[in-house]
Image (cartoon, rainbow, N blue to C red):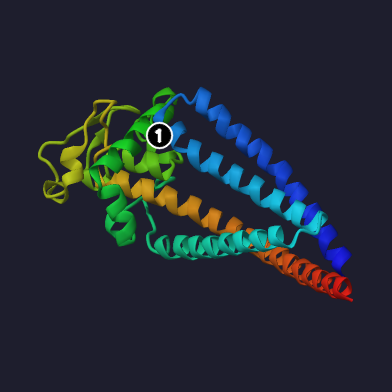
């Protein structure tokens, strides 16, 4: 059992070590080639994750292959911390993204989103001025609304028939309840008189035909960003769940290897005394 568990731990951690190298490589590449602040945001998480995986893998390899019990103890302790952190992150991502759903626009291939439909924690994140400035900068760098400018619309209503992402729906066009008339893909005309439904709606007055502004400061834009985050976090939660099962299995194998290693240590110490 000792040889089997040690062999499995060595193989799994060798694979983990190999995986950590390209992760660290991506982090180093971003450090020297980051074109924007948004790219730099990913720099340290990627580097830290890669280095952490490398250290844990090396501890597991030396501990199991060389039968060094202290290394196995440290390896299992770090694995335990990783499992707890991943479990908490998975549960948290599910809880905070449980609320929120878009309303389909009649005759359109997209949905509109309301900020109040999302969890208070997410609302506070996008409600922070500094955080939102960073998000807007990232969206500007990514050109999220640029695709609408190059589309060829035969009629003004073609935008309603096209499929928009949650961010494009909330940030690149005024909400439908404003009643604004679409002249082309990038220009909307404010009707006179203004519809009653739009009078007390801040998003309607916030909208601008200026391509650098559009509806980036609208609540609908923040809601669209949260809708995108919700979709991505649910995918990440599914991946984290699979990874969590894998780590638990590896942790169990590591415990078997540690137990066998401790028995061998006691056996050799006993033989040494006799």
> Left or right: 258 with respect to 224?
right
Give the class, few, some or many, for how many residues have Cα within 10 Å of label 1's Cα (few <14, many ≥20): some
Q: Where is residue 224 shown, x and y percent of the image?
A: 36, 47
Q: What residue lies at 28% left-to-right and 37% top-to-bottom?
A: 133
Q: Where is residue 85 shown, x and y percent of the image?
A: 52, 61
**Towards the viewer: 124 or 196:** 124
Q: What residue lies at 22% left-to-right and 42% top-to-bottom?
A: 179
Q: Where is residue 102 shown, x and y percent of the image?
A: 38, 55
**Towards the viewer: 147 or 143:** 143
**Quarter residue 83 falls in:** bottom right
**Quarter residue 185 falls in:** top left
| Secondary structure under the numbered disc 1 in the rendered image | helix
128 relative to 147, above or below = below
Q: Where is residue 87 shown, x and y percent of the image?
A: 54, 65
- Can residue 172 be seen in this snapshot? no
> Left or right: 177 with respect to 20?
left
Quarter in which the C terminus is drawn: bottom right
210 relative to 15, above or below = above
Count of numbered marks: 1
> Left or right: 111 with respect to 181?
right
**Towards the viewer: 163 or 73:** 73
Quarter in which the N terminus is drawn: bottom right
In the picture as drawn, the residue positioned furthest to the front comes out as 273
Q: What residue lies at 29% left-to-right and 26% top-to-bottom?
A: 211
- Can residue 64 be seen in this snapshot? yes
Q: What residue lies at 58% left-to-right and 59% top-to-bottom?
A: 82
> Left or right: 246 with respect to 186?
right
109 relative to 144, above or below = below
Question: Which residue matches tag 1?
Answer: 158
């Amino acid at each position: 059992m000792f040889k089997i568990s040690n062999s499995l731990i060595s193989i799994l951690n060798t694979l983990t070590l190999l995986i950590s190298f390209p992760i660290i490589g991506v982090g180093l590449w971003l450090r020297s080639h980051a074109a924007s602040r948004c790219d730099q945001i990913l720099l340290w998480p990627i580097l830290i994750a890669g280095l952490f995986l490398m250290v844990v893998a090396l501890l597991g390899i030396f501990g199991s292959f060389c039968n060094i019990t202290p290394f196995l103890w440290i390896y299992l302790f770090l694995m335990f911390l990783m499992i707890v952190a991943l479990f908490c992150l998975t549960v948290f991502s599910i809880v905070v993204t449980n609320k929120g759903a878009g309303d389909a626009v009649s005759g359109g291939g997209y949905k509109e989103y309301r900020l109040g439909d999302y969890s208070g924690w997410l609302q506070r994140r996008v409600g922070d001025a500094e955080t939102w400035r960073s998000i807007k900068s990232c969206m500007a760098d990514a050109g999220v609304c640029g695709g609408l400018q190059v589309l060829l619309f035969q009629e003004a209503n073609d935008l309603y028939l096209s499929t928009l992402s949650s961010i494009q729906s909330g940030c690149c066009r005024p909400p439908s309840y404003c009643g604004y008339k679409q002249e082309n893909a990038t220009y909307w005309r404010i009707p006179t008189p203004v519809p009653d439904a739009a009078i007390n709606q801040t998003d309607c007055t916030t909208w601008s035909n200026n391509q650098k502004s559009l509806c980036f400061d609208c609540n609908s834009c923040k809601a669209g960003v949260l809708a995108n985050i919700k979709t991505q976090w649910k995918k990440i939660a599914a991946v984290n769940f699979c990874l969590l099962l894998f780590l638990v299995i590896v942790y169990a194998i590591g415990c078997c290897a540690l137990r066998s290693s401790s028995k061998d240590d006691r056996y050799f110490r006993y033989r040494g005394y006799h």
